[in-house]
């Protein structure tokens, strides 16, 4: 099987490692990829991955049997439609189905139609409506930019003025009831009709230990969740995923690809905080680290409507932990160009890195590397992940020291 992988972060590095380890894969091309992905794939840096025609042409050129789309922007732009238009299987939803992530208001509309448990919400187009909605729901206020905002579109605050300011800055917003309870992510592989859950995971959004400081794309993650109720995945499949897939199919826009269900485990049961239409980053990395089933075969089955005939998933025993190393300045504008040493080890995934002309590996983005390790339990996986962290050096590196710390003791992080 010849595979084309789109994306350039640590999630895509994890996908590349999994795809290249599948004996069915005879050739792996990544666009644009990164220096870590270059170890297991041929890189094509000359194609804009949000240009549907350009990606479809590349898929034809490399003779791809399967295209795997890592990030959301190409999906929202219609890359999967263009690839399928060439008769090539694609793991990722159509532009119409990617609206589950591309528009929070659309996601809420689908959830309402499908009877999916989620917080009450109001979509507001102007400051007067926004102010009225804030007062209906009361503090803490939850204000979400309707469109894609690279993980930074949501403000949760007790400060009414700050909530109003975010609404004014965004334009169209979704105001939501605040959902109290620990958060979990469930990733579900879908072929339009059939859906197979992966393991629940949890990520850490704030830059600082103890969930302090600015919001980030994610500073670490772990799986599985020892504190989660038994049967969580089954409950979410029944209450959320199957009704959502049925509603999307009913609308003539079946969902094929990875449905990411962000949940709050409230006193009244799991409620959906958000849908994403691709693997989480960095929470996807820990789930992939535990998946023993060959990855290309699974994603190809989903892309071709053949999941019902796919064998049950197999998982490695134990747990996985990912710790993100970020550049100086992150989550503000990151400093780039710092020389990195010690990254050339299994489990160190590249995110924001580049090769200098002299071959040195340097920082080139906010989140620079992920250190991902498995172990017999969360404590062992943590120790192994932090041992990887200790071996990597670059000036200004920042990381959290408390990833999976509470979970290793059996308590949710948040
Ligand atoms: P989202 O981009 O929708 O995942 O939101 C980012 C983060 O904001 C989530 O991971 C939650 O921590 C928080 N959040 C979003 N919606 C709510 C809500 N309705 N109640 C409480 N927290 C929320």
Image (cartoon, rainbow, N blue to C red):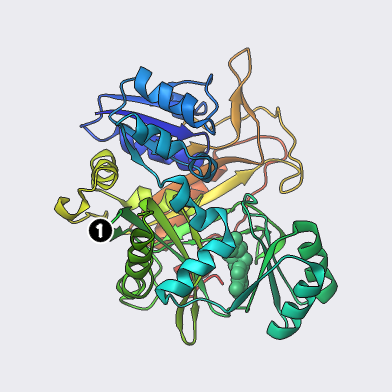
Q: Tell me: residue 388, above or below residue 232.
A: above
Residue 372's x, y, as percent? 45, 47
Residue 240 in picture, x, y percent from top left = 38, 71
Q: Quadrant of the C terminus?
A: bottom right
Left-right relation of 20 to 82: left
Judged from the image, the secondary structure of the residue bearing numbered disc 1 is loop
Give the left or right position of residue 131, taking residue 178 as reference.
right
Q: Is mark 1 within 8 Å of ligand 1?
A: no
211 or 250: nearer the viewer: 250
Residue 135: tell me if it is visible: yes
Res 369 → quadrant: top right
Can residue 31 be seen here?
no
Ligand 1 occupies quarter: bottom right
The image shows residue 201, relative to residue 218, as above or below, that is below
Q: Quadrant of residue 41?
A: top left
Compare residues 184 and 251 and report the one nearer the observer.
251
User: Residue 183, how many percent across, how many down?
Assistant: 51, 70
Q: Quadrant of residue 58?
A: top left
Q: Residue furthest bottom?
A: 268
Instruction: Indicate whether 368 appears above or below 171.
Output: above
Residue under numbered circle 1 = 194
């Amino acid at each position: 099987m010849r595979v084309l992988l789109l994306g350039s972060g640590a999630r895509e590095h994890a996908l590349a490692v999994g795809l290249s380890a599948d004996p069915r894969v005879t050739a792996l091309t990544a666009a644009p990829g990164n220096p870590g992905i270059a170890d297991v794939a041929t890189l094509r840096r000359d194609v804009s991955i949000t240009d549907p025609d350009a990606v479809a042409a590349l898929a034809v050129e490399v003779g791809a049997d399967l295209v795997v789309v890592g990030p959301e922007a190409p999906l929202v732009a219609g890359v999967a439609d263009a690839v399928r238009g060439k008769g090539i299987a694609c793991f990722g939803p159509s532009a119409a189905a990617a609206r589950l992530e591309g528009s929070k208001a659309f996601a809420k509309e689908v959830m309402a139609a499908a009877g999916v448990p989620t917080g009450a919400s109001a979509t507001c187009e102007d400051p007067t409506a926004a102010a009225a909605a804030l007062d209906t729901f009361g503090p803490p206020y939850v204000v979400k930019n309707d469109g894609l905002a690279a993980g930074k579109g949501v403000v949760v605050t007790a400060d009414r003025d700050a909530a109003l300011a975010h609404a004014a800055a965004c334009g169209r917003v979704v105001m939501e009831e605040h959902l109290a309870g620990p958060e979990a992510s469930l990733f579900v592989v879908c072929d339009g009709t059939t859906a197979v859950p992966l393991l629940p995971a949890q990520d850490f959004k704030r830059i600082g230990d103890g969930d302090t400081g600015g919001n980030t794309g994610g500073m670490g993650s772990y799986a599985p969740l020892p504190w989660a109720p038994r049967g969580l995945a089954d409950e979410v499949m029944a209450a959320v995923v199957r009704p959502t897939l049925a509603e999307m199919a009913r609308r003539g826009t079946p969902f094929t690809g990875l449905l990411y269900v962000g949940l709050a485990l409230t006193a009244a049961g799991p409620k959906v905080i958000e849908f994403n239409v691709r693997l989480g980053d960095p929470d996807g990395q820990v789930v992939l680290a535990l998946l023993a089933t060959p990855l290309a075969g699974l994603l190809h089955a989903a892309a071709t409507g053949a999941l019902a005939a796919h064998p049950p998933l197999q998982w490695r025993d134990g747990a996985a932990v990912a710790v993100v190393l970020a550049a100086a300045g992150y989550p503000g504008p990151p400093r780039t160009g710092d020389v990195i040493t010690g990254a050339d080890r299994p489990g160190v995934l590249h995110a924001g890195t580049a090769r200098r002309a002299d071959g040195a590996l340097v920082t080139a983005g906010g989140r620079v590397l992920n250190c991902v390790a498995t172990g017999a339990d969360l404590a062992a996986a943590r120790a192994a992940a932090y041992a990887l962290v200790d071996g990597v050096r670059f000036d200004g590196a920042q990381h959290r020291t408390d990833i999976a710390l509470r979970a290793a003791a059996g308590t949710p992080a948040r």
